[in-house]
């Protein structure tokens, strides 16, 4: 990968990059198309597939994270990906590995509070991938809103010469955001998973008429989620989309994010209200 990337640099070939953990779906492929559009037919589009162990907590789903490399290859080929980069754990974290990248501010709340070592793993692996692939543009999905904000901050703070693009979430017809983890859902959990999107919609409708206290919306969303027998709210937050500072008064333009367990599967979603 390093040899290819430095060759492209020397030849002035634009590189678009989509980092993933595999088990690809239409959401990932929309990121690939976005990257292609940005680098053009003469550019190179790289997809990485790496289930990064450092971003999983000790009780999380690393071992059973879904994998299907043959299907991923097929989707990448059909989408016109030039290089599929699939490093091994030994290559990414060789014996004695001891260096990490930590964003200290935006990573404290929400996913960072629920998954304390998660973002350290994400920023570390994305830095390593940026150094290996040397992309001009890297495309991330808006479903992981906090992740995208942290990567943008890290890219600026550490002067990576990479344009970070955040592309829209792709959804099922009933509004469920596409995610590799949707595969874990039982039929009843899958049915009830629309509660995330419905909660976002509820808040959007509530603020359409004017500003609303965050406490009131938190209560309403909590009650709504409690109506789904398989669902358990992990968090719901209202915040400024630029700074991620919590909002006490929620209005149009406020960002909302939530994480909900359906059985053992934890799903996240977010929207600008
Ligand atoms: O969003 C993901 O799939 C992962 O967090 C990423 C960015 C590929 C890093 O492992």
Image: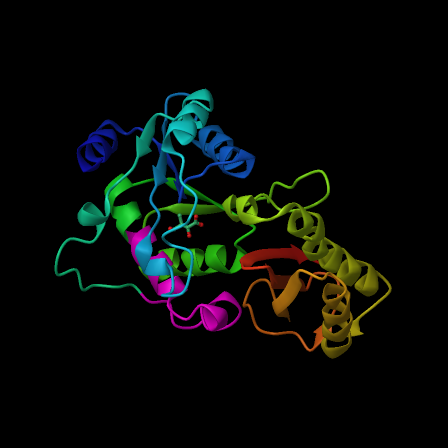
Q: Where 257 falls versus 23 (above or below)?
A: below
Quadrant for the N terminus in the image: top left
Visible in this render: residue 228? yes
Task: State the image quarter where residue 234 is shown.
Answer: bottom right
Where residue 241 sits: x, y (%)? 59, 62
139 in magenta: no
Instruction: Please state if 243 lies on the left or on the right of 228 as rendered.
Output: left
Instruction: Please state if 44 lies on the left or on the right of 110 as rendered.
Output: left
Residue for point 63% across, 69% down: 237
Where residue 133 sits: x, y (%)? 28, 40
Residue for point 40% across, 63% down: 118
Which contiguous range is marked in magenta?
102-127
Where residue 120 sits: x, y (%)? 35, 64
110 in magenta: yes
Residue for point 36% across, 52% down: 63
Foreground of the two, 93 or 272? 93
Where residue 160 sits: x, y (%)? 31, 52
């Amino acid at each position: 990968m390093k040899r290819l990337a430095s060759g492209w640099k020397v030849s002035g070939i634009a590189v678009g990059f989509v980092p993933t953990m595999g088990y690809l779906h239409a959401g990932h492929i929309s990121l690939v198309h976005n990257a292609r559009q940005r680098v053009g037919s003469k550019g190179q589009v790289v997809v990485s597939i790496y289930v990064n162990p450092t971003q999983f907590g000790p009780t999380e789903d690393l071992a059973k994270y879904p994998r299907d490399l043959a299907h991923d290859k097929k989707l990448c080929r059909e989408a016109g990906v030039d290089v599929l980069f699939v490093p091994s754990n030994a290559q990414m974290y060789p014996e004695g590995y001891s260096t990490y990248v930590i964003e200290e501010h935006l990573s404290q709340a929400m996913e960072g509070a629920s998954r304390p070592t998660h973002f350290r793993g994400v920023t570390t692996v994305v830095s390593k991938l940026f150094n290996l692939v040397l992309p001009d543009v890297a495309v991330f999905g808006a479903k992981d809103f906090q992740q995208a904000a942290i990567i943008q901050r890290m890219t600026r703070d550490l002067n990576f010469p990479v344009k970070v693009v955040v592309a829209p979430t792709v959804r099922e017809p009933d509004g469920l955001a596409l995610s590799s983890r949707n595969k874990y859902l039982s039929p009843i959990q899958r049915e009830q998973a629309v509660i995330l999107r419905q909660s976002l919609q509820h808040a959007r409708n509530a603020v359409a008429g004017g500003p609303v206290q965050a406490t009131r919306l938190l209560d309403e969303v909590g009650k709504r989620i409690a109506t789904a027998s398989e669902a358990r709210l992990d968090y719901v937050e209202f915040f400024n989309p630029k700074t991620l500072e919590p909002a006490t008064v929620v209005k149009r333009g406020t960002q909302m994010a939530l994480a909900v367990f359906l059985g053992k599967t934890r799903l996240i979603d977010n929207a600008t209200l």
